Each structure stands twice: as structure tokens, then as C-alpha cells.
Image (cartoon, rainbow, N blue to C red):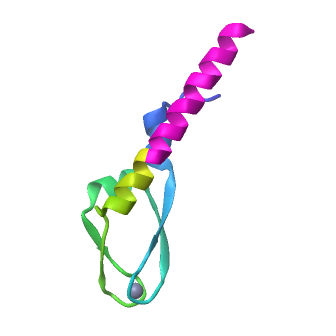
Amino acid sequence: MGTETISEIVSNYELTIACEKCGAQSQKTIGWIRLHRDMKCPQCDSVIVLNTSRITATIRSVERRLGDLQSQLTERIRKL
Ligand SMILES: [Zn+2]
């Protein structure tokens, strides 16, 4: 394992953002999404809101899953 912390891994985790108007998909990291409230669709130029409850919930579930993984790994290493 590298020296990345869980929060760094979460920040670098890419989510797929879909445009509601035209369906175009873009990959954005969670770190990037946290710094932006919205973005322009690269295809149709309409505004895509990023701080929706759906995206926030996805970020939270990624954090939770990685946090669980970290505690499982720590537990396993301790048993070796
Ligand atoms: Zn679009």
C-alpha cells in the first residue's frame, strides 16, 4: 500500500456526472466536485448542478465504503 490516506483516495475517486438535458457523461473526481457548485455540460453547454442530494449521497457512500475497507485492512494487518 502507498502512503495515500483514505481522504486522498476519496478525493481522487472519479464519479460519472450525467447531463440531464442531453445525457452526455463526464468523469470528475470527488475533490473537484467539492470545489465546484456546478459545471457546464461539455456537449450542450447547459448548467449541471453538482451539489445535488444524489451526488452528495454518492460521495458519502464512497467515503463509508473506503472507511470500512481501511478498518478491515487495519484489523487484518494486526492479526498477521
Ligand atoms: Zn448536455
- Whole-percent x, y for residue 57 in the image: 39, 53
The furthest residue to the top:
79
Residue 53 horizontal side relative to residue 62, left or right: left
The vertical placement of 66 against 60, above or below, is: above
Q: Which residues are magenta?
A: 61-80
Q: Main secondary structure of the magenta part?
A: helix
| Residue at 51%, 57% in the rendered image | 14
The vertical placement of 18 against 45, above or below, is: above
Q: How many marks?
A: 0
- Whole-percent x, y for residue 8 in the image: 45, 38
Residue 4 in view in this figure: no
| Residue at 27%, 61% in the rendered image | 36
Quarter occupied by residue 56:
bottom left
Q: Ligand 1 lies in which image quarter?
A: bottom left
Magenta span contains residue 49: no
Q: Nearer the viewer, residue 76 or 8?
A: 76
The vertical placement of 39 against 15, above or below, is: below
The vertical placement of 59 against 19, above or below, is: above
- Whole-percent x, y for residue 26 in the image: 48, 72
| Residue at 28%, 61% in the rendered image | 51
Residue 5 horizontal side relative to residue 52, left or right: right
Q: Nearer the viewer, residue 71 or 46?
A: 71
The furthest residue to the right:
80
Residue 44 horizontal side relative to residue 73, left or right: left
Residue 33 horizontal side relative to residue 80, left or right: left
Residue 46 in view in this figure: yes
Q: Nearer the viewer, residue 38 or 68?
A: 68
- Whole-percent x, y for residue 47 in the image: 28, 80
Magenta span contains residue 74: yes
Q: Quadrant of the C terminus?
A: top right
Q: Quadrant of the N terminus?
A: top right
| Residue at 31%, 53% in the rendered image | 34
